[in-house]
Image: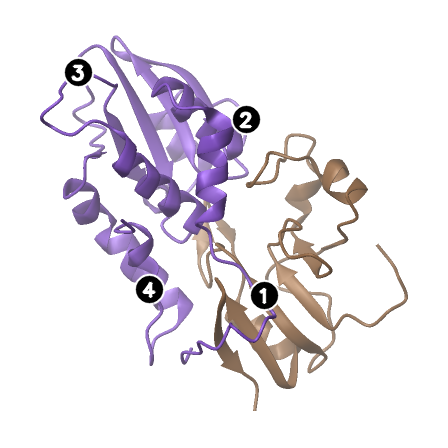
Amino acid sequence: MTRFQDLLAASPNSSPSREQDRASRELPAVVRASRLHWWEPSAPPAGGTAVLLVVAPWSHYDLAMLDVLDESVPGPDRPGEAPPVFVANLERYRSVEELTADIPILESFPFQSPIAALWRDGAFRNVAWGKAGRDLVADALDLPPEAFNEQVIARTPRYSPSPDRTSHVGA
Amino acid sequence: MSTGRAITKINLGGEGEEPSILNQQRRAVLDPGWRGCRKGDTLEQLASQGHDFLICPNTALCIADDSVDLVVTNSVRIDGLVLGEPTVQSSEIRRILASGGEWVHDGVARYTKP
């Protein structure tokens, strides 16, 4: 299933930036249709453990990660088997100060996405970004971090100079 | 990085995920806290693996007009701002591409310069 990576599907007569704008707009609806949860800062989880992922909707790494998580986390018929995973859009934050206002334990500049934060009993307890952020969510969900990271990378498109790369759409 | 060779292929925002292609990054890559997205490598680790980096702003690539045969971008925001910082600019891509040069974004050819 690639419901999240499909957000960045290239289309003729479009451009990467317009497709990224579209992915940003449609991300909340796709999260709500998945096994993941949309993060509302005004209504955080009341208690227990949860994971927040602030993702870049232009990043196949982040969207592939969400696809892997959507396939990995228990469905609604198995409540309580794993911490719920909440998702927020990095583009809602215009500065690192705005991001820190929502995640106060973020002490260093996040050079990469996702920004992953562990929520426990009403407060954030741990935060990491980039590959370390993927490790954090894997640990929280009891997934092997290196295998999880390899799954994400394997799904991420890249340039291929081989003759197989024949697709071409207008920018 | 200075090899004395002409830049013919460049990966804007690259981290070495495209072998044998020069990577461009902003000055932020020089921060000791910077890590690559894929495996969490430092700049020094990536360089020691043989990856070359050109460090310049996204808004003013230090590359001549009409000079590059291939621009690659992977999982980077195009024509936007991320936490207030300007991202890769399509106008700069169009500027540096040579006639017949190609922009490949996320593995798909998106633009060929007339």
Residue A127: x and y in percent read: 44, 21
C-alpha span from label 1 to label 3? 43 Å
Tally the marks.
Answer: 4
Chain A drawing hue: purple
C-alpha span from label 2 to label 4? 33 Å
Q: Residue at x 31, y 43 (%)?
A: A67
Image quarter for residue A21? Answer: bottom left
Circle 1 marks a residue in which chain?
B
C-alpha span from label 1 to label 2? 29 Å
Amino acid type indicated by mark 4: Ala
Residue underneath mark 3: A80
Residue B28: x and y in percent read: 64, 43
Residue B34: x and y in percent read: 63, 35
Residue underneath mark 4: A9
Amino acid type indicated by mark 1: Val
Residue underneath mark 2: A108
Chain B drawing hue: brown
**Furthest residue toward bottom:** B114
Q: Nearer the viewer, mark 1 or mark 2?
A: 1
Circle 2 marks a residue in which chain?
A
Q: Nearer the viewer, mark 2 or mark 4?
A: 4
Q: Residue at x 60, y 34 (%)?
A: B40
Residue underneath mark 1: B72
Above-or-below relation of B21 to B70: above
